[in-house]
Amino acid sequence: MNWRRLQFLWNRNRMERDLAEEMEAHRAMMDTPAHFGNVTRLREEAADLWGFRWLDEFLQDARHGARVFRRSPSFTLTAVAVLTLGFGVNLALFQVINATLIQPLRLRDPGTIIRLFQNASGARSSGVAYPVAEYLRNNSEVFSAMLMVQNLALPWGEATSDKLAASFVSANYFSELGAGMALGRAIQADEAGTAAVLSHQFWQTRLGGDPGVVGSSIRLNGRAVPVIGVAAANFTGPSLSPVQVWLPLENLDSLYPGSRWKTAWGDRGFNIYARLKPGVTETAAREALRTPMAELGRLYPNEVGDEPWIGTASGDAHFRRDRDKQEALMAVVLLLGISTLMLAIACSNLASLTIAHISARAGEFKMRTALGAGQGRVLRQLMAESSLLVAAGLIGGWACGYAAAQALLAEFETPVTIAPWPEWRLALGAAALAFFALFFVALPPALRLRNRGARTGMQQALVGVQVMGSCVLLLFGGMMTRKLQSVISEDLGFQFEKVAILEASLDRYGLNPAAVTAYWSAMRDAVAADPRMTGVALSTTAPLGNAINQSRYRDAPGLSVTVVRADAAFFDLLKIPLLAGRTFQPGDKPGTSVIVSQRLAQAMYGTLNVLGQGFPKTAEGQRATIIGVAADARLIQIAATDGAECYYPLTLSSMPHALLMTRVSTSQLDPLYAAARQVNPAITPSVTWMRAGFEKKLQAPMAAGLLATVLAALGLGLTAIGIFGLLAYSVSLRTKEIGIRMALGAPRTGVLWLVVKKLAIPVGAGALTGLLVVRGGLSKMLSGEPLYVDPADPLTLAVAMGTLLAAAFTACLGPVARAVRISPSSALRE
Amino acid sequence: MPRETGVPSGTLIMMVLQVLRHGPLHGYAIAQRIHLLSKDALRVEEGSLYPALQKLLMEGWVKAEWAVSDSGRKVREYSLTAAGRKQCEAEVAEYERLSSAVRAVLKGAK
């Protein structure tokens, strides 16, 4: 019946005409046409059955509202600005969340692609070794295609410091993922020699969108590589981390001569994606891979580890594993919570503005009620008027939100493009926001109209909501800022300034153990010989890097222990003091000597006097002996409060994927590159500043902190305006009363209290609720990974509350000054 | 002449559907037909006929088309749809069940 109603609505004019003509004909056929009655009234009664009356009324109210708003432009502008702000924040975050976390990846049929993760007992990794992937492809029946991807940073152009995010991909990559091309062609199976496909973003931003780029060449790792195509703008690849150039996998050989990635069983550096055969589920595929993995465990026990197995993640879930999904969900909940709060502040602000505006139109509403309008009718009128404001705010918010979302995505170099027109999920979200706003803005004034008289309870409640929202935002912003401040200013426990990391990925070149040892000792010598570099150390873990090797011990509950294999010079280079014992010596065996950090010693043994103790405290079988205690150093998780470290000597088998660290005094990394070229020109290392890792780790918390602070400032500003509005209104309502009190000799402080009293309850209750919200729910979410904020920090609480009170106080000044200056005689004359 | 009354409440829709069973009719003719069939006992008010017809249209039980009457006048004729026919049968059956029940009560109470 509903579609028919729509049809009727569509043909409404014709239907009305039909009805009128029909009735006219009927009248003419009657013996006494006068008996027909009032044609217009009958027609309207019949037409009521179509159910369009609400629409007529709505349009009538909207027209009336538009006239009212035209007459009071300042109210209208303020209202639209407030709503634009509320919607803008929400829609910007919606856009970003939708584009990066929810919207399906732009791949052909992403639900049937899975990513593989090679795991073994006690060792999880995010990649797969190439020969393992190849073995699985040849020895399992569940995949119709397997995509192999190796992401590397390649030096670009003449300077060695300029690097591109390069992706070496198997030949089926573009066709299997359904990628379109903007220019030229994709990588093909029989690609002869080197070839590069550029990303659209790289082509546009770094090469100026040169239309003749196909056929030219770019310089990668010192070689000229012909450009064969540019990928379509909307192609992101399977992950949303930016890729600037794609190269055929086989090019690894020519760009890294001598590399033996095809037989590097221990190098789990490949990202492997597989297309499931029709009808095969992700779980079935995972189970089917158990047999070949067990076989590999027998064939290569040292390389693939104990009890090897393959973990999977589906393209529908953006290739996120369960743990990553939780993190993503937390980010979404947090962001949506904050933005909803912002909208609630904006709407309650506007609702109290509307109440003030309505009391200026009291005459009009009295007239309407006198003419017989019921409460429902008045609410509908307010809704119609508010819907105009909401529509205008939504348009403004959409524009601002789109611009902000684009800026945010560009800031994080996310390769997703967002369209200015609404995607259906966004349109749904926007509609939900609009309804939320409509009720929030129209309902309080309607309730207020019902309660006649000079009461301010409704505005007080609305101010309470605003104070609550601001309080939560302030506390959140404060906690984030404080955490950032402490991370930046506090000592991490080690010195990373000017330290460079050289990653040679020797396991890719298939060097034998002797050659690996020789390479590292030659590198040490070359670095030591250059006066621009001081100190040199090897380790398996890059401090401030992304790779984590963590353990938890029964003897030290609640501590995540980062396990590092390093040489003796590691502590000296990073300036990690040894509090007791000694560093490693040549005779120390990997399994028997260990250096623990201060916190680990305290947690496990309750004392720092642990030299010579067995580690871990209670373990079966062979235990290591503690030879030293190092000061705490937050090597990887810089914000963590539950971290500790333990260090083992380097083993021969860990040498191929060791990293070299040294302190470089020049501003560029050239000396280290030069040393590497001199030692072995065939090996192309990747060199980075340790500081870059630090900055990268700060990026997300910085953004969150900035967002929280900006929102807190905006929310507080709105709340201050709300408080000002409440007091100004209450003073204007009570001018006469205050005048009489003054005339009777009331002290000014009494009058002051009379006015400020209105504020005490909403501000107090709002702040208390806000505090409870933060302490109750939010702090649990924030105190752990990855933010580690301290929800109970007294300074944060004090500053947040102080700011709130200061803002409330400032907002009071105007109305209070007006109140105490009311002259009794003029007040009584009114 | 028998006394004229309005249509008993709730039965107008059923009667309109019923008179349309024998072919399309325009509004005036529907009113006339009911009047005649009731032996002048019932008179359909225009004020209730047209809302009823709009309801029938909205429910999709009848459809309306412009036609030229025998007297050469342009009239809007209503005809039953398949859904309308089904609805008519259901309503008549329901009405008969109800009225026989009422009759039984009246007879028993005598």
Image (cartoon, grey):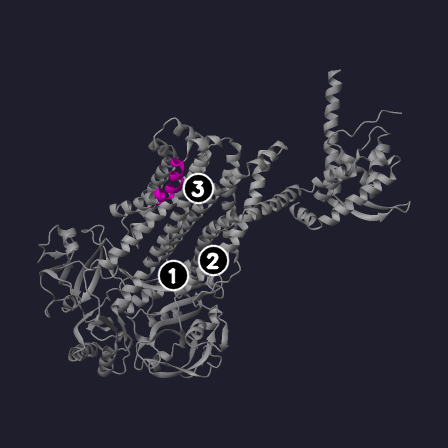
Secondary structure state at the residue bearing disc 2? helix
Percent position (x, y) of residue A130?
34, 72
Give whichever of discs 2 and 3 has the lower sequence position: 2
In the depicted structure, whether residue B100 falls above or below residue A332 = above
SS assignment for the magenta stretch, majority: helix
Residue A204 placement (x, y as % from top left): 45, 74
Label 2 to label 3, Cα distance in Å?
26 Å
The N terminus of chain A, quarter of image: top right
**Quarter of the figure with residue A572:** bottom left
Magenta stretch in the rendered image: A807-821
Q: Say which mark, if any, is on residue A400.
A: 2
Residue in front for this viewpoint, A9 or A79:
A79
Query: With respect to residue A714, does A187 lie above or below?
Result: below
Report how far apart the C-alphas of labels 1 and 3 lie in the structure: 57 Å
Chain ID at mark 2: A
- x, y percentage for residue A18? 78, 46
Disc 1 marks which residue? A312
> Is A211 covered by the magenta stretch?
no
Q: Nearer the viewer, mark 1 or mark 2?
A: 2
On screen, A715 above or below A103?
above
Residue type at mark 2 is Cys
Q: Nearer the viewer, mark 2 or mark 3?
A: 3
x, y percent for residue A407: 42, 63
Hey, which residue is sitting farthest top in the picture?
B110
Instruction: Give the residue number, with chain letter if any, for mark 3.
Output: A725
Horizontal side of A90 relative to A605 (left or right) equals right
Q: Say what amino acid the circle numbered 1 marks.
A: Thr
